[in-house]
Image (cartoon, rainbow, N blue to C red):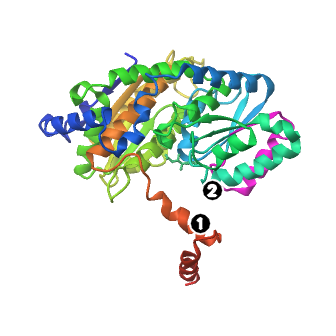
Amino acid sequence: QAFSLNFSLLSKFINEEEKNKYTNIISLIHEEMHAPTSNDRDALGWIELATKQDKEEIDRILAVANEIRSQSAVLIVIGIGGSYLGAKAVQDALTPYFSKKSGETEVIYAGQNMSGAYINQLLQYVDDREVYVNVISKSGTTLEPAISFRVIKSYMEKRYGEEMKNRIILTTDPENGLLRKLALDGGYRSFEVPADVGGRFSVLTPVGLFPLAVGGIDIQALLDGAKQATNDLMFSNYKENEAYEYALSRYLLEKKGYIIEIMASFEPSLRNVFEWWKQLFGESEGKDEKGIFPVSVTYTTDLHSIGQYIQAGKRQIFETILHVRNQQEDCTIQSVENNFDQLNFLEDKTFHDINTIAKNSSILAHYDGGVPVIQVEIDKLDEYHLGYLLYFFEKACAMSAYLSGVNPFDQPGVESYKNNIFALLNKPGYESLKDELEERLSE
Ligand code: PA5
């Protein structure tokens, strides 16, 4: 089986009777998601991205990506939040830990922070390498990518002159925003973020697909996995739809005080898949003083840091363990002559065997310590299974947010800090907020 979930370690915490009560409401939410009558229809385009693929667009993505792969050592991807986390998640999950495949174009991210040191060092790093740039911002107004793009665009102008126009590709809203204007007026090549797909649901649009194609990822296999998930997860009854059963289980756990979800894996390469997952759920659910706080860990590393808390700290956490059943690469323990470390009993076991036993041991220990555990398993770590997994979480996230009565697709809370930044940076129009904030800061 390519993908499976196991809820058996929840039975002590929630029961079938409680779940059954939500059968109808889940079906109703499902119907509304698939044939929306409300404004949310404007944000539900992600549901069918993989089943209604735009062949022409994919061919164009591959053509531009191949051009970059043949001509450039580096692609700088400028974006923040949903505009970079999906690509980075898949890229990092499928890239060797220590060496790049020779001849591959390196994909480097910028605009996801405002560190001057980061941008300076990035430009120094690429100075003796051929560079292309992909700036991704649906709105075109987000400050972090905007200031990085300003600096990187000037660098590209100085370095490449007029040719820089061919080396900068914009990914933005089809009609609106400053980047769309720049694409139209300035003659830059561009891709579209569909108007009805929000940032954190956009990994299967050019936002994710283009950088991934440049990085040598098989985007067709990624879409195929997502397509399979779309078909598997189209049933309205949660008993036939694992995304909805996951959403319902989380919802019932939250109602019982389990307000923190720890996403855990024993594969370090999944670290950035979890960063993507955290943003997806945190930004979709955390509103109106509701929502589960998403946290992620890598085991067994983190068993030696916050493992103690998970085992025996305040009981408000549940765990979702993502296990990769088969490893393409492994390392076998050999016996040694003098058994100096007394580990000969492990002879012929692989690291993956031991890691899997560590996983099973931790699950049982945490469960015994009062932690509800949901188990997710994928057959192997490749494009197909990641595509499946990403879509699974998107579908679950939308259902989960709707169940708790919040809109999964907006993020009004993000505006508060942005307004403060603009006011304190003297952006015209923010004068009275600036005075108020400065007074508070001087106290
Ligand atoms: O999920 C979201 O909508 C956000 O995280 C955005 O992706 C993020 O704020 C970046 O926005 P933009 O692409 O408009 O620059």
How many numbered discs, if any?
2
Per the image, the residue denoted by label 2 is 143
Under circle 2, the secondary element is helix
Per the image, the residue denoted by label 1 is 421
- Where residue 235 appears, as percent x and y from the top left, is 26, 25
- Quarter of the rendering containing residue 165: top right
Front-most of 324 and 442?
442
Given the image, on which type of amino acid does mark 1 rest? Ile
Asked if the residue at tag 2 contacts the one at tag 1, i.e. Cβ–Cβ closer than 8 Å, the answer is yes
Above or below residue 61? Residue 255 is below
Task: Indicate which disc, 1 or 2, sits on the residue closer to the N terminus.
Answer: 2
- Where residue 18 appears, as percent x and y from the top left, is 14, 40
Is disc 1 surrounded by few (<14), some (14 to 19) or many (20+) residues within 10 Å? some
Is disc 2 surrounded by few (<14), some (14 to 19) or many (20+) residues within 10 Å? some
- Give me the residue at 26% from left, 31% from top: 7
Above or below residue 235? Residue 162 is below
Membership of 22 in magenta stretch = no
Q: Between marks 1 and 2, how big is the CA–CA gap?
A: 9 Å
**Is residue 327 among what the camera can see?**
no
**Is residue 137 among what the camera can see?**
yes
- Relative to 105, is 37 on the left or the right? left
Front-most of 25 and 322?
25
